[in-house]
Image (tube, rainbow, N blue to C red):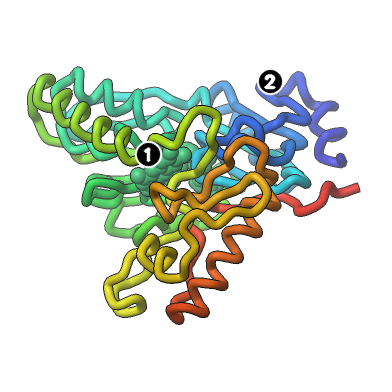
Amino acid sequence: MAAQQKLVKSIDDFSGTSFDVPLGARSSFRCGGIASCVYSPKNIQDLVAFRRWNSEPETFLGGLSNILIRSGGIDGVVIRLKNICQCNISEQSIFGGGMRNVDACKMVASAGYSGMEFLIGIPGTIGGAIAMNAGAHNAEVADILAWIEVMDETGTITRIDRKDINMKYRDGGLESDYLVTQACFNLRPSTQDKVAMKHAEVLCERAAKMNFGKNVGSAGSAFKNPSKEESDGRRAWELIDAAGCRGLTRGGAIMSDKHANFLLNTGNATPDDIEALGEEVRQRVFEATGVLLEWEIRIIGNKVKAE
Ligand SMILES: Cc1cc2nc3c(=O)[nH]c(=O)nc-3n(C[C@H](O)[C@H](O)[C@H](O)COP(=O)(O)OP(=O)(O)OC[C@H]3O[C@@H](n4cnc5c(N)ncnc54)[C@H](O)[C@@H]3O)c2cc1C
C-alpha cells in the first residue's frame, strides 16, 4: 500500500504505471494473485530514473510463462519491459529484453539467420529466456548468447560477456537486482526457407507433445531434470512416474497424464492447489527414489493477502 501511495503521487513522472493488476489471471497458469503496482517503462531513460527513485521491492516479469503467483499477490513494484523490444538483426543479433521470443525468431528467420530456432516454441520474452537459460531440442540460450546488458538497482547499465555469466541448466546465473535490458545472440547465415522449415518442425513436435486442451494452464516443466549422478540418468518425468504421481490431482490441479512433469490448471485450480500438488509430488518422489526434485517454475508472491 505504501508503494501505491508513493507511486500515485508521482504518476505523472512515471507514465506506464498501473495499480492492482490481475497478473495471476494473465499468467500462463491462468490463476494467481494481483500485483499492487506494475511499471512498464516507455524507454530505458525512464527506467533508469525510476530505479534510482524507487525504494520499494522490485520484481521483474516478462511473459509470465514460468511463474506461479500466490493468491496473496505481489507487493512492491513489478517491472515489465513490454516496450523495450528494439532489435538489430545480423550475425550478432541484438534484442531488447521485453521482446517476445516468437517475434525475435520470426525476424531472424526473415533476415535469413539460423541458431535461434529452438526458441520459437518457448513462450515468453528474451529477458525471461536469459533469466531461465531457457532451452529445448538439445539447445539452450547459453549456447548462443554473446553478451547481455543488465541494469542494477541504482539504474547503472553494464554489459557482461557470456563467459563471465555463470549460466547453468535452467538458470541464467543473474544477480537478483539485474534486469536484462538487452541481449546479443551469435547466429549464422542461412536461408529464410531453411529456417522456416526448422520452425515448422519444432512447432509441430511441440504441438503434438503439449496439446493439453483449451483453457488449461501450465508453466512448462514443473521441475528441473536432476543431474545424472543424482538420479542415475532418470529424468524428472521418469521419477514422477516411478513415484506413481502421473495423473495425481489436488483441487483443480493435475500432474498431466500426457507429460508427467507438467503441472496443469484444468480450469479452476488455485495457486495453493498447484503449489501443494507440486510439493506433494516432490515429497513422494523423494520417498520413492531418494531424489529431491527442484522446482523449475518460479513461485512468487504472498501466500495470504497482506493487510
Ligand atoms: C506451454 C509452455 C511450454 C514451455 N516450454 C518450455 C521449454 O521448452 N523450455 C524452457 O526452458 N521453458 C519452457 N517454458 C517455460 C517458460 O516459457 C520459459 O522459462 C521462459 O523463458 C520464461 O520467460 P518469461 O518472459 O515468460 O518469464 P517470466 O515467466 O515472466 O519470468 C520468469 C523468470 O525470469 C525473470 N525475468 C523475466 N524477465 C526478466 C528480465 N528482463 N530481466 C531479468 N529477469 C527477468 C523473472 O524474474 C522470473 O524469475 C514453457 C512454458 C509454457 C507455458
**Image vertical order of residue 146 relative to residue 109, above or below:** below
Give the class, few, some or many, for how many residues have Cα within 10 Å of label 2's Cα (few <14, many ≥20).
few
Give the class, few, some or many, for how many residues have Cα within 10 Å of label 1's Cα (few <14, many ≥20).
few
Q: Which mark is residue 210?
A: 1
Q: Secondary structure at mark 1?
A: loop
Q: Residue at x 35, y 78 (%)?
A: 230
Q: Residue 65 appears at what percent x and percent y?
A: 50, 39
Q: Residue at x 30, y 79 (%)?
A: 229
Identity of the amino acid at label 2?
Answer: Ser
- Whether residue 143 is visible to the viewer of this picture, yes or no, is yes
Quadrant position of residue 169: bottom left
Give the alpha-carbon distance from disc 1 to disc 2, as whole Å.
38 Å
Identity of the amino acid at label 1?
Answer: Met
- Whether residue 179 is visible to the viewer of this picture, yes or no, is no
Q: Residue at x 61, y 30 (%)?
A: 26
Q: Earlier in the sequence, mark 1 or mark 2?
A: 2
Q: Residue at x 37, y 51 (%)?
A: 133
Between 133 and 255, which is closer to the camera in this rendering?
255
CB of residue at label 1: within 8 Å of ligand 1?
Answer: yes
Left or right of residue 216, residue 126 in this image: left
Q: Disc 2 marks which residue? A: 15
Quadrant position of residue 88: top left
Asked whether the residues under the numbered discs 1 and 2 touch, taking CB atoms below 8 Å apart as contact, a structural biologist would say: no
